[in-house]
């Protein structure tokens, strides 16, 4: 059971933008020790400096530790996590957030390199990071894994094919992890957001900002802060409470395929 007097430690994958960055800001503000990760070293360094400037240190130690790695590379993942100083290596919470969509095409027109990026990041990357973190949680007899799924993991939408498949996999892996980790006192939660305006659509449309903007035309999407608040809520329940699965959408969105857009 976590000692309520000790600051808690969270590792967030994909903290260089969007949900992960908003989570890093919120957890640091609330006094957590935050391990931020991603591939873009410059962004990690800027965020670490900013959060330490805002929140100083926790009990004489730094409030943020930055780790650069690509979740798709199992050796990089292992090396990065093994490099953590002892005081950072006892994570209370892991958020598997790093992920992306690449392309929005009918299956017959999909690009295999897009498929590989999505499968390698959203499914295999989540597994590699979890595999590196879970043994420590088992040894400590406690921990919490929060997987960022999607409404795309609940229902498939037109042209969503492979992205939806990866998020259905996250849904299944979350359930499987919860069963397997039950005897070890480890909580496993899925947070499954609907449409949220981050860098997600710019990445999906290979940098086409105008097309990305159209994704959110005529309704108010979720913000990264909205999703961070839900993750924080899940992470701060009492030890005997596990939120298994949280679907959060904009008010204008009913499910993966139904968004009410005004004047569009
Ligand atoms: P962003 O594009 O803003 O952020 C994605 C993050 O993932 C970045 O920090 C990026 O960091 C990181 N990332 C991507 N690929 C890798 C990789 N190979 N290795 C390490 N880190 C990686 O998108 P969001 O914040 O919106 O997305 C976060 C998660 O939420 C994703 O899993 C996404 O599928 C999911 N989601 C998004 C929704 C939305 O509408 N926005 C809705 C539902 C779920 P870097 O490039 O520095 O490596
Ligand atoms: C992101 C939400 O609807 O673009 O997972 O797939 S959606």
Image (cartoon, rainbow, N blue to C red):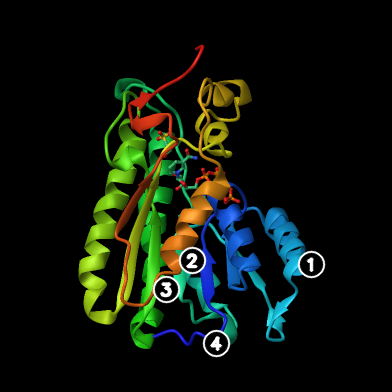
Q: Is residue 102 shown left or right of residue 6?
A: left
- 54 or 105: nearer the viewer: 54
Residue topped by disc 1: 53
Viewer-side label of 1, 4: 4
Residue topped by disc 2: 77
Per the image, label 1 sits on a secondary structure element best described as helix
Mark 1, ligand 1, within 8 Å: the answer is: no
Residue under the image location 34 percent in, 56 percent down = 190
Mark 1 or mark 4, earlier in chain: 4
Label for residue 5?
Answer: 4
Give me the C-alpha separation between circle 3 and circle 2: 10 Å
Per the image, label 4 sits on a secondary structure element best described as loop
Q: Position of residue 121 (x, y in %)?
A: 43, 50
Crowding around mark 2 (Cα neighbors within 10 Å: few <14, some 14 to 19, many 20+) is many
Q: Is residue 183 shown left or right of residue 89?
A: left
Residue under the image location 58 percent in, 25 percent down = 213
Crowding around mark 3 (Cα neighbors within 10 Å: few <14, some 14 to 19, many 20+) is many
Which residue is the extreme one toward the right? 53
* Mark 1 touches mark 2? (CB < 8 Å): no
Residue under the image location 29 percent in, 58 percent down = 174
Specify whether residue 73 is in view.
Answer: no
Viewer-side label of 4, 2: 4
- 185 or 29: nearer the viewer: 29
Label for residue 133?
Answer: 3
Residue 249 occupies quadrant: top left
Q: Is residue 144 shown left or right of residue 61?
A: left
Q: Is residue 203 above or below residue 150?
A: above
Give me the C-alpha separation between circle 4 and circle 2: 30 Å
Which residue is the extreme one toward the top? 263
């Amino acid at each position: 059971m976590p000692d309520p007097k000790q600051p808690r430690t969270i590792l967030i994958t994909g903290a260089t933008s969007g949900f992960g960055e908003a989570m890093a800001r919120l957890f640091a503000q609330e006094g957590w020790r935050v391990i931020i990760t991603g591939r873009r070293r410059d962004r990690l360094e800027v965020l670490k400096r900013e959060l330490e400037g805002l929140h100083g240190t926790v009990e004489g130690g730094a409030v943020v530790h930055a780790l650069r790695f690509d979740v798709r590379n199992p050796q990089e993942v292992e090396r990065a996590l093994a490099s953590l100083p002892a005081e950072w290596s006892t994570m209370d919470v892991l958020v598997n957030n790093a992920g992306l969509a690449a392309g929005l095409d009918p299956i017959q027109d999909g690009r295999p390199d897009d498929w590989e990026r999505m499968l390698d990041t959203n499914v295999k990357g989540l597994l590699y990071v979890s595999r590196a973190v879970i043994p420590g949680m088992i040894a400590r007899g406690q921990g919490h894994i929060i997987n960022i799924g999607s409404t795309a993991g609940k229902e498939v939408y037109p042209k969503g094919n492979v992205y939806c498949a990866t998020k259905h996999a996250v849904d299944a892996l979350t359930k499987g992890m919860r069963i397997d980790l039950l005897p070890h006192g480890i909580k496993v939660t899925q947070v499954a957001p609907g449409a949220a305006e981050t860098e997600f659509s710019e990445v999906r449309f290979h940098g086409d900002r105008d097309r990305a903007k159209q994704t959110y035309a005529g309704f108010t999407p979720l913000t990264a802060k909205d999703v961070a608040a839900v993750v924080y809520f899940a992470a701060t329940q009492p030890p005997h409470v596990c939120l298994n699965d949280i679907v959060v959408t904009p008010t204008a969105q009913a499910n993966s395929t139904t968004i009410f857009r005004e004047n569009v």
